[in-house]
Image: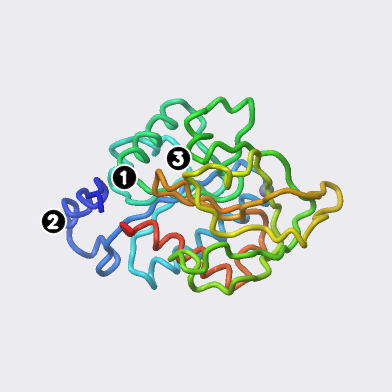
Amino acid sequence: MMLKPALLAGLVFSAILPSACFAGDATFRVLAFYSTNVEFDHVEFAEQAIRFYTEAARKDHFEFDTTTRWDDLEAKHLSQYQVVLWLNDFPHTQAQRDAFQQYMSHGGAWLGFHVAAYNDRDTKWPWFVDFLGGTVFYGNNWPPLPAKLVVDDPAHPVTHHLPTRFTAPANEWYIWKPSPRLNKDVKVLVTLDAANYPLGFKDTLTAGDLPVVWTNTKYKMIYMNMGHGDKIFTSSVQNRLFEDALLWLTRGD
Ligand code: ZN
């Protein structure tokens, strides 16, 4: 396991600050970025995600901070955190992008939801496309709908508490091209069951490989397709996935 700068920073801080600054015996720190000036359904998701991870932090003993200041994507600030979450948005400036790239290239961890990974020919951030597994947003269903999901690897620490098949609550599902599964460095953990097709009414997904949760094994990262609207946290099964994904990112395995 790499010695992470965030861990070092945590040790320094705990030496000079009263222990009351930390939640009990917190061993790692997580920072969630989100925006409030984006699509309303994405704001709703972020607010519920913050409640969910705040509760998980109490239970699993970690520090959970949130910010709407994307300029906090900056080396000194990031050095205090072992995991960064993007709940409903992505960096907007070159400086923010560069800081994130440096952070991930030096042992940082990332959990991104739904629109956080959005990219197209106008976003012009080739490093990020590669980081995702060389994949570009291609399409979505509308309106948001529940979907049957299949767990690709039931032994992985992120998915080992899940049944091999479960129904996820209503979400706007994104399909990506080429499928990240075609990248040898990508490990797909959960996939949309093809039995869902056609999925949608106004916008309809009709076919194609649609990975829902994956990791690019060159980094400590997970992308989750979920993240649209106020139904996402209504499944205890899926909630377990969200919790285990974050916990896995904090570990070295
Ligand atoms: Zn959405």
Q: Are marks 3 and 2 in contact (CB under 8 Å)?
A: no
Crowd rating for badge 3 (residues with CA inside 10 Å; few <14, some 14–19, many 20+) = few
Residue 114 spot, x, y in % from top left = 60, 49
**Residue type pointed to by label 1:** Gly
Frontmost of labels 3 and 1 is 1
Distance from disc 3 to disc 1, alpha carbons, whole Å, reads 22 Å
At 33% from the left edge and 42% from the top edge, which residue is drawn? Answer: 78
Q: Reply above or below: 177 against 158.
A: above
Label 1 secondary element: loop
Residue 148 spot, x, y in % from top left = 70, 65
Q: Reply above or below: 128 against 21.
A: above
Residue 159 spot, x, y in % from top left = 50, 66
Q: Nearer the viewer, residue 163 or 61?
A: 163
Residue 200 spot, x, y in % from top left = 82, 54
- Image quadrant in which the C terminus is located: bottom left
Disc 1 CB within 8 Å of nearest ligand 1 atom: no
Label 3 secondary element: loop
At 53% from the left edge and 42% from the top edge, which residue is drawn? Answer: 183
Q: Which mark is residue 107?
A: 1
Q: Nearer the viewer, residue 43 or 244?
A: 244
Q: Nearer the viewer, residue 10 or 176?
A: 176
Identify residue for label 3: 69
Q: Which mark is residue 15?
A: 2
